[in-house]
Image (spheres, rainbow, N blue to C red):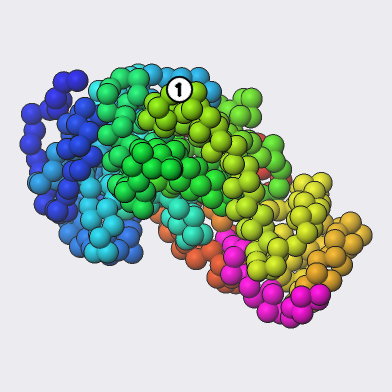
Amino acid sequence: MSASPDSSTRTSAAITGFERTFVDELTSLTVPWQGADTPAPRLLVVNETLAAELGLDVEELRTDDGVALLSGAAAPSDAVPVATAYSGHQFGGYTPLLGDGRALLLGELVDPNGRRVDLQLKGSGRTPFSRGGDGFAVVGPMLREYLVSEAMHALGIPTTRSLSVVATGRDIQRTGAEPGAVLARIAASHLRVGTFEYAVRNTDLTQQLADYAIDRHYPELAGSGGSEAVNRYVAFFEAVLERQAALVARWMLVGFVHGVMNTDNTTISGETIDYGPCAFLDAFDPSAVFSSIDHAGRYAFGNQPAVLKWNLARFAETLLRFMAPTPDEAIAAATDVLAGYEARYEYHFAGGMASKIGLADAPPEPDLIADLLTLMREHRADWTGTFRALADELRGDQLPVTSLIPRDQIGPWLERWRSTLARLGREPESVAATMDRVNPVYIPRNHQVDAALRAATDGDLEPFRRLLAAVTHPYERRTDWAHYAAPAPQAFSESFQTFCGT
Ligand code: AMP
Ligand code: MG
């Protein structure tokens, strides 16, 4: 691929100390590139907490030089940004070349605790991987990623983080003209299943890539060699499966619909990535689909665990030749690991559900959870609201539960639940307090997110800031945030759609 598109050499030292292990070790998966210029850059939001965690000087980020760096208009003074190559199965079909069509990896940073992360820009202009796309992004969707990723982090769910959003001052053509923006995000790395799918078909670097990923994300496996009882690439596959199974279980426990679980959006680190058409459930409905392009419901809420297994099988295929001396043995080893997937997912999901109903250390009989889910589905109960309502019930306030599921329907279940707690000698008040520590009050509700992003696109960031404050303190019930806990009006929920790649 050709080099940088532009002769401009503007640089910024607002962030220094970049490292480049990925570029150095896997050079042919990267193309040196630089961002497009920005007509009138303006910092819309910067994540002070995250900047501090990374040891960055937030005041420096607010300067013209800082904003130029965060928008891609200036390259770091001590690093060469790159676009990276990857492939992916999108909606089940293989696309041989995707890559960073509108993203730039500025480099790696090592935080004060020694943790290595990527700093990547999204929306910084065309790259050699842009295909028909314009390489840009717009304010609404970039603030959406910022808001939802930070909400996920606050919920304790592994995710890429958002450092900033800069409005570029450039109008971008979508359904109409929309204000352009660049997101700066932080990730444990941007290695995806799709990175391996690309490497195995186009390079002889797959083993090197796997070793790199093991060193960076699973250092505990780094010592195991091919001759030992467990082959290190089998162990690597199993470790990724474990982290991803735990991750998707966490999504299911908070009612998160990723919306576009293509293999290029499945990370090796086990972090959630790419908040395009994602959404949170209001009413519990396993068939819920919000993405405008997911006509067959492949990525419906309830399909996510099964889709992840499919994606993990695609990942295993890229590692087969390193897993055992013969293809048959390799297939047997991979199949064996994959066969354990359901049990690993169920372990994480059932454990999480037990915590949600106050039985963390004494998992109830499986029917108790299954029967609650059936009731919630039959009555289209609000996913997030139900678990807080159950805690209120234990404190003697019956109204919240009754407003979600008629008492004559949920009564017998409540009896069984209460008698399980009583059998364990649990004090209802203290169980309620434990439940409130794991069940959020505030999630980014679609109607609230929509309204906040519409206002932001029109220049008013206040609703976004207020919503961000609530969803990044998800367990802290506050009267002035009460409206953020309310489900969407039904008419909104029925017609709500999200859009990809915007
Ligand atoms: P995503 O659905 O965001 O995971 O993106 C899928 C692929 O489409 C990636 O290779 C992106 O880089 C690319 N892509 C999405 N939007 C654009 C755009 N506006 N311009 C260029 N490439 C894009
Ligand atoms: Mg993606």
Q: Quadrant of residue 200?
A: top left
Image coords of residue 298 (percent x, y): 61, 29
Is residue 435 found inside the magenta-colored segment of the image?
yes
The quadrant in which the C terminus is found is top left
> Where 307 falls versus 200 (above or below)?
below
Q: Nearer the viewer, residue 40 or 140?
A: 140
Could you say whether the residue bearing mark 1 is in a helix, strand or loop?
Answer: helix
Residue 119 appears left or right of 501: left
Residue at 27%, 34% in the rendered image: 208
Which amino acid, by three-letter code, is at mark 1?
Pro
Residue at 32%, 47% in the rendered image: 222
Q: Which of 343 and 34 is in front in this view?
A: 343
Residue at which label 1 appears? 327
Q: Does the image show residue 133?
A: no
The residue segment tinted magenta is: 422-442
Image coords of residue 26 (percent x, y): 22, 33
Residue 264 appears left or right of 407: left
> Where 299 falls versus 352 (above or below)?
above
Q: Is the magenta stretch mostly helix, strand or loop?
A: helix
Image coords of residue 245 (percent x, y): 54, 45
Residue at 30%, 35% in the rendered image: 209
Q: In which quarter of the image is residue 403?
A: bottom right
Is residue 470 found inside the magenta-colored segment of the image?
no
Image coords of residue 241 (percent x, y): 50, 42
Q: Does the image show residue 212?
A: yes
Residue 152 appears left or right of 290: left
Total marks placed = 1
Task: Name the residue at the right extreme.
Answer: 408
Q: Nearer the viewer, residue 315 or 110?
A: 315
Residue at 59%, 65% in the rendered image: 438
